Amino acid sequence: MYGTNVIREAGLISRLSEMGRPIVDHGDISYQVALEDADESVGYIKHSRTLGNALKTVSDSVYSIVSEHQQTCVVLGGDHSLSIGSLHGHARAEPNMCVIWIDAHADLNLPQTSPSRNLHGMVLSFVCKETKKYLPNVPGFEWCSPCIDASNIAYIGLRDIDPGESYILDNYGMKCFDIHQIDKYGIAEIFSRAMEWVNPRGDKPIHLSFDIDSLDPIVSPSTGTPVWGGLTYREGMYIAEEVSRTNLMSVVDLVEVNPQLGTPAQQEATVQTAVDVLMAAIGKRREGNTPPDYKIPDP
């Protein structure tokens, strides 16, 4: 929650308000620690019941915001496991949605293939229909039924993939645009190809899941699993702006900002980059926006 508070304090809400966007801050999620999680040796994931309870709350909240209020939903993390809840809730509200996943990592490990056993590296295996047959029973996640077809997911920026993830990517129809392809073809062409893959008719709501470690550590160093050779600031902003220009974005996740890591200057750079990406995704343009109801004053 520390990262989300710092993003708020960096002016996200006030800057969105200046754009004329109605803002409702739903605050941080609340959840209870499951007593059964005291025994950390049980199962594949530590504290799985507590995490499952928290992510069900995220799912229910996103479902409510998208289906009842018809608003763009901004979900701030925290680590990327948050997106299990946001993707699940979004898919419940809009089953036809598609996913643009911006990340250095595939976050596609199954619990039994994960080298780290960290839930934030397993996100898509919990919600992807094609991996259901491999997914073991994880206490606390009984509510989380797979809900997204692999063909509705496109990755941009991958450069650190584990063997289990590579196997799934090769065999189950997810489109992966890694950093080598971005170097070869350019971000504009790669984004166009990603959209053509997941949303060829331009009629699906978009879920943009943006991990700040997709960017190079020179740009966003204050994150837990940085990988050198990532997207530039301009490439990250281009993706966010282009998603916004589709007028189809329904949910955006911004995750993995950890302002407790790095020097004060690195922390500030990472947080400001996160705010810039979110602003671009919501509609802020680098060439400038005309304020709502703006009129030129009389001479």
Image (cartoon, helix red, strand yellow):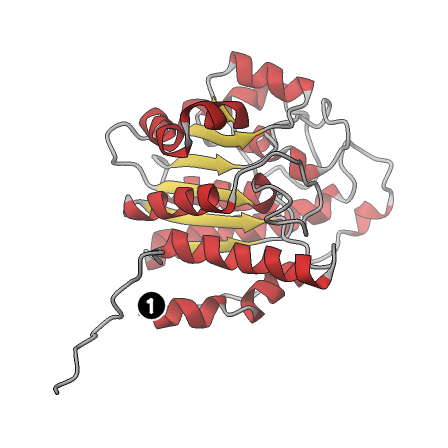
Quarter the N terminus occupies: bottom right
Q: Is residue 259 left or right of residue 156?
A: right
Q: Residue furthest bottom?
A: 299
Q: Residue furthest top?
A: 171
- In percent of width and height, residue 108 lies at 60, 28
In the picture shown, does residue 185 fall above or below 101?
A: above
- Give me the residue at 87% from left, 36% from top: 41
- In percent of width and height, residue 238 lies at 40, 44
Q: Residue furthest left?
A: 298
Query: Quarter of the image holding residue 64?
Result: bottom left
Q: Does the image show residue 57?
A: yes
Of residues 257 and 110, the one drawn nearer to the viewer in this rendering: 257
- Give me the residue at 55% from left, 52% from top: 58
- In percent of width and height, residue 258 lies at 68, 54
Of residues 274 and 146, the one drawn nearer to the viewer in this rendering: 274
Query: Quarter of the image holding residue 85?
Result: top right
Q: Is residue 199 left or right of residue 224?
A: left
Of residues 251 and 280, the one drawn nearer to the viewer in this rendering: 280
- In percent of width and height, residue 182 lies at 47, 28
In the picture shown, does residue 165 fall above or below 65?
A: above
Query: Quarter of the image holding residue 193?
Result: top left
Amino acid type, label 1:
Met
Q: Is residue 77 left or right of residue 250?
A: right
List the residue tagged with mark 1.
19
Mark 1 residue element: loop
- Give me the residue at 53% from left, 55% from top: 273
- Give me the residue at 56% from left, 21% from top: 131
Quarter the C terminus occupies: bottom left
Of residues 230 and 247, the one drawn nearer to the viewer in this rendering: 230
In the picture shown, does residue 163 fall above or below 14?
A: above
